[in-house]
Image (cartoon, rainbow, N blue to C red):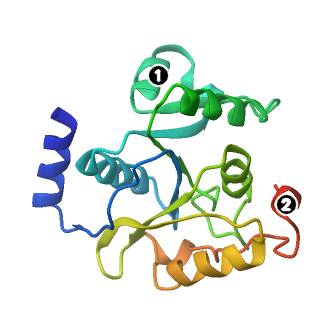
Amino acid sequence: MLRRAIAGLFWTFSRWRLVTTPAPTRPTVLIGAPHTSNWDFVLMLAIAWRLQVPIRWLGKKSLFRGWRGGPMRRLGGIPVDRDDPSRVVADVLAQIAAGEVFGLVITPDGTRTSRSGWKSGFYRIARAAGMPVTLGYVDRTTMTAGLGPTIELTGDVAADMTVIRAFYADKAGFRPELRSEPRLRDEEGRAGETAP
């Protein structure tokens, strides 16, 4: 309840406005895009806490060393060993099997700098874990942030990305000049063949 109260204060006094569809009721991959600033994380926490959506997010394991480990995990962090990224899906599946309902936040832009497209990890994880994808966003041009629709991926990468691209077409991010086009390197391939 404390988190929801903090988020309520944030949305009451912030210049940002929360706009959302109903929160997901089953485990989902929650896209955080466009990812152009560290403020995106603050806004995503405010969204999740206000809507009471437990979130998990992936971070390099070095972020969890020492004193930072406890707070990072309490905020929903899952450490990722870049030498063995396959464990991520196994960890997510274990949480689903335990009955948890959560949004696994992934920023497919991958960085806070402009890129030529998105990384396909969100797509591969969603397909491997049988999870839908919820389209979270930040848009400075309208000063809005929130959750868009939750969609089921079909395995037809090009068709799925066309739907995702249409949703994000008018979303600019916190720093619009750093926005990346929602496009995977190989939209002609099948889900398991998309570029990392």
Q: Is the residue under label 2 in contact with that under label 1 (CB below 8 Å)?
A: no
Which residue is the extreme one toward the top? 66
| Apparent side of residue 120 relative to residue 147 in the rendered image (left or right) | right
> Which mark identifies residue 184?
none
What kind of residue is marked 1? Arg
Position of residue 182 measured from the top left corner of the image (x, y, whole percent): 64, 74
Q: Quadrant of residue 113?
A: bottom right
Q: Nearer the viewer, residue 70 or 21?
A: 21
Residue 60 in sight: no
Q: Is residue 97 above or below residue 57?
A: above
Above or below, 122 relative to 83: below
Helix, strand or loop status at disc 2: loop
* Amino acid identity at mark 2: Ala
Tell me the quadrant of the picture where the C terminus can be found. bottom right
Q: Position of residue 85 (x, y in %)?
A: 77, 35
Res 8 visible: yes
107 left or right of 47? right
Please report the residue visible at 63 percent of the width from the left and 26 percent of the height from the top: 62
* Residue receiving disc 1: 68
Q: Report the label total.
A: 2
Tag 2 or tag 1, which sits nearer the N-term? 1
The residue under label 2 is: 195
Q: Is residue 187 left or right of residue 152?
A: right
- Look at 29% across and 74% down and name the residue there: 143
Q: Is residue 52 left or right of residue 125?
A: left
Q: Residue at x 17, y 61 (%)?
A: 14
73 lies above or below 145: above
Other residues around mark 1 within 10 Å, as few (<14) / some (14–19) / many (≥20): few
